[in-house]
Image (cartoon, rainbow, N blue to C red):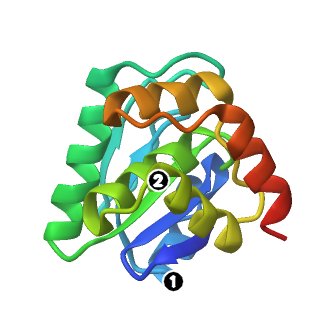
Amino acid sequence: MDEIRSWLYIGKFRDTLDKKYLELNRIKSMLQLADPVNQPSINSIYLPVEDLAPTSPLLIKQGIDFILAEKEKGHKVLVACGAGINRSTAFCMAALKEVEGLSLSDAYKDIKRKHPESIPHEPVWESFCSYYNETTPYIDIMRLSIRIF
């Protein structure tokens, strides 16, 4: 699990299972994208977002609405998918876009610096670009991924 902002964390499925680790990081909310995990005292939502498939606008909206509502409550939010690479990156990018007004590619650059394994897969990237009416080609994200380090 890595801190993207003081209120936003990105992680893997296994992070959602470790109650002590969640408590240590003061996580109060989780957007779960791999499998649902019930942690008492942590507000969670599970969304069935496929790893290698396009993400529906409805699921994007549900995930973003959850993150923003939990941030508004002053909660630290963990966004977790299976490996903490693809789906969690996309939702964290969207959160930074919504809160800070960053483009998806600028949000990705920032996340990548703090969570080096981040890289959205092409169908997920294209889904989020479509949702936000952005036109950054996926090849540019691949180039960014290489140049950041």
Query: In the picture, which quadrant includes the C terminus?
Result: bottom right
Residue 93, position as x, y percentages in the image: 47, 53
- Mark in front: 2 vs 1: 2
Q: Quadrant of residue 48?
A: top left
Q: Residue 3 versus residue 148: which sits nearer the camera?
A: 148
Residue appearing at x 16%, y 57% in the figure: 69
- Type of amino acid under label 1: Leu
47 versus 96 height, above or below = above
**Which is nearer the eye, 144 or 89?**
144
Cα–Cα span, label 2 and label 1: 24 Å
Residue under numbered circle 2: 93
Quarter the N terminus occupies: bottom right
Position of residue 86 relative to residue 18, above or below, is above
- Describe the element under mark 1 as helix, strand or loop: helix
Specify which label sits upstream in the sequence, 2 or 1.
1
Height in image: 109 above or below 55?
Answer: below
- On the image, the x and y values in percent for residue 82 come to 65, 39
The residue that appears at 34% across and 32% down in the rendered structure is 133
Q: Position of residue 100 (x, y in %)?
A: 31, 69
Number of the label disc, if any, that sits on residue 114: none
Left or right of 61, for residue 21: right
Q: Position of residue 57 (x, y in %)?
A: 31, 23
Q: Between 69 and 35, which is closer to the camera in this rendering?
A: 69
Query: Which residue appears at 77% of the width and 54% of the height?
Result: 145
Amino acid type of the residue tagged 2 in the rendering: Met
Mark on residue 24?
Answer: 1
Front position in the image: 49 or 123:
123
Classify mark 1: residues with Cα within 10 Å, few (<14), some (14-19) or many (20+): few
Asked whether, in this view, residue 148 is left or right of residue 60, the answer is right
Q: Which secondary structure, mark 2?
A: helix
Taking the image as shown, residue 15 lies to the left or right of residue 101, namely: right
